[in-house]
Amino acid sequence: MPTKTPSEQSAEQSGFLRDPEVQLMLRAKEGDDEAFGQLVNVYQDRLANIFRHLVAGQEAAEDLAQEVFLRIYRARNGYQPNARFSTWLFRIANNLASNARRSKGRRKEVNLVGTASGPMGVRPQEQLAIAKSGLMPTRQLDQRELQVVVQNAIEQLSDRQRMAVLLNKYEEMSYEDIGQAMEMSPSAVKSLLSRARENLRQILEPYMQLGRDSK
């Protein structure tokens, strides 16, 4: 990414100060543990859910989510609002997930089938399937069947594609914010997501054909 001038950096930082979560983190920097607790409450389940799709097991996902907050808390004294708080948080999460995969090898299949609701709301796989992507078969699917089909497709994406899809579809992050979180340019993120969508289309195409043939 091109280097920004000091004036550009200052103006951008002023914009980030309008982020309520940045304000909470600045309060935490000053010793306000209640403000830090609010950030934990907002993101702990969301982080664990993201990690659950990237590493093997619920316990490992929860441990990594806790580690993200430990790192943030330890870094609080030197915190500078150079990005949205969520972007900074998911950058740490992405690095931790990458380290976990390298140390344990490629993740094994995780059972993602379950209830569609809960503290996290609709699962990312279902959001992806329900979105107007034109990927799903024309016949009506029951909820459990939809979960299984799309889960299998998501599982076949590369680790980086899966992370980008989750941040884009589930966290609704822009290409620029995903790029900051994953240390990529916005154009590289766009290309990564394009390849992910094409991979999903190819994976789901046989099932789509089956749906058309069964009508």
Image (cartoon, rainbow, N blue to C red):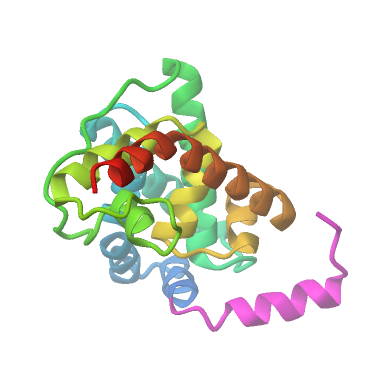
Please provide percent x and percent y for residue 209.
Answer: 37, 40
Q: Nearer the viewer, residue 197 or 107?
A: 197
Q: Is residue 143 above or below residue 67?
A: below
Above or below residue 68? Residue 8 is below
| Residue 96 part of the magenta segment | no
Residue visible at 44% across and 19% down in the picture: 106
Residue plotted at (84% across, 66% down): 4
Q: Quadrant of residue 178?
A: bottom right
The answer to which of 42 and 202 lies nearer the viewer is 202
Return the x and y of residue 100 as percentages of the image width and height: 44, 26
Report which quarter residue 16 is drawn in: bottom right
Using the rendered image of the protein, determine whether residue 176 is visible from the camera's viewpoint: yes
User: Residue 25 is drawn in which quadrant?
Assistant: bottom left
Residue 7 located within the stretch drawn in magenta: yes
Q: Is residue 31 left or right of residue 82?
A: left
- Quarter of the figure that contains the N terminus: bottom right
> Residue 8 at x, y = what percent?
81, 75
In the image, residue 20 sits, relative to residue 215, either above or below, namely below
Residue 24 position within the rendered picture, expressed as x and y whole percent measured from the top left = 41, 73
Q: Residue at x 61, y 42 (%)?
A: 195
Dominant secondary structure, magenta: helix
Residue bounds of the magenta highlight: 1-20
Seen at 48% across and 62% down, the residue is 86
